[in-house]
Image (cartoon, grey):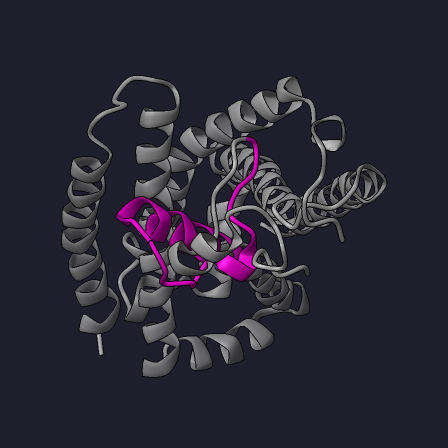
Amino acid sequence: MRDPADGAPGGDERQVRGPVQRKGFGLAPTGWVDPRGRTLGAWAFAANRITGLGLVFYLYLHLGVLTTLLWGAHAWGRFLGVATNIVFLGLDVVLLFGLLYHGLNGVRVMLVGTGFVTDRQRALWWAGAAIGTVVLVGGASHFLGGR
Amino acid sequence: MRTEPGISEREPFATQTRVWRWTALTGVALLALVTIHMIAHHFVVEGIGGLRTYRQVLEYIGNPVIFAIECIFLVVVTIHAMLGLRSVLFDLNFGPGARARINRGLVALGVVTVVYGLVLIGTLASRA
């Protein structure tokens, strides 16, 4: 990929401020974790993309795991033996975090994108963070509390 | 890979808008469907992690209402996932030809995913 500073107008400034998000495009994945000139919205966007990709990966992992149901009660029982392991339950908490972040940030993006709340992006993000934290703590204690 | 496509090479604004609306619409539906799915699979049954035994899974999926909800969930989550993947891939600024191939590939992947999921759900429901 071409370096933006290679002779392009404003290239020097772009090196300092980081990648620009152009109208009609999202930030390219190479710029998701670039810390230069990042706002809360830019970090929220990158986290939304990363959690989204994680959830797509989980969708196929989930379908693969559920396939063991086709092999009968014994195979499913063996899977449950692994799934109730503390490490696996910890991954359930990570999954819950991904779902909460992606879902609550998605609500924020939709409210802003549809024009309902265009000037409260940061407040919406923090509200989502507060709600998500409460639900995550409750969910985690439920997942791990049975052990 | 293109780094700076010209205006004429970019995806039409109407298509971008349509994709955004479908992503938002399926996202809203998923808020309800994922909540139902998570509660049903982790917060209803007593036991570690709230996970169901083989017999409990078959009884659960054998319920016609649950069966319908799970089928709708599968279709909606797959559409949302494919649109999300499409957005990430399109952020790489590919040219029109590559974008068309990505579109076809994601439609094929989505169809395979839904068909496999429906076969899985249907097979389990038939065993109930």
Residue at the spot x=61%, y=50% of the render? Answer: A8
Q: Nearer the viewer, residue B53 or A61?
A: A61
Describe residue B8's horizontal placement relative to residue A112 as left or right: right
Q: Is residue A26 above or below residue A85?
A: above
Describe residue A2's horizontal placement relative to residue A38 as left or right: right
Q: Nearer the viewer, residue A36 or A137?
A: A36
The answer to if A50 sits in the magenta stretch is yes
Describe residue B70's horizontal placement relative to residue A83 as left or right: right
Residue at the spot x=26%, y=62% of the render? Answer: B46
Q: Is residue A122 above or below residue A129?
A: above
Q: Nearer the viewer, residue B100 or A31?
A: A31
Q: Is residue B58 above or below residue A103?
A: below
Give, as a single range, the part of the protein colored magenta. Answer: A24-53
Residue at the spot x=25%, y=22% of the render? Answer: A117
Residue A60: quarter of image: bottom right
Q: Position of residue A92 (x, y in %)?
A: 36, 67
Q: Position of residue A66 (x, y in %)?
A: 58, 62
Residue A112: quarter of image: top left
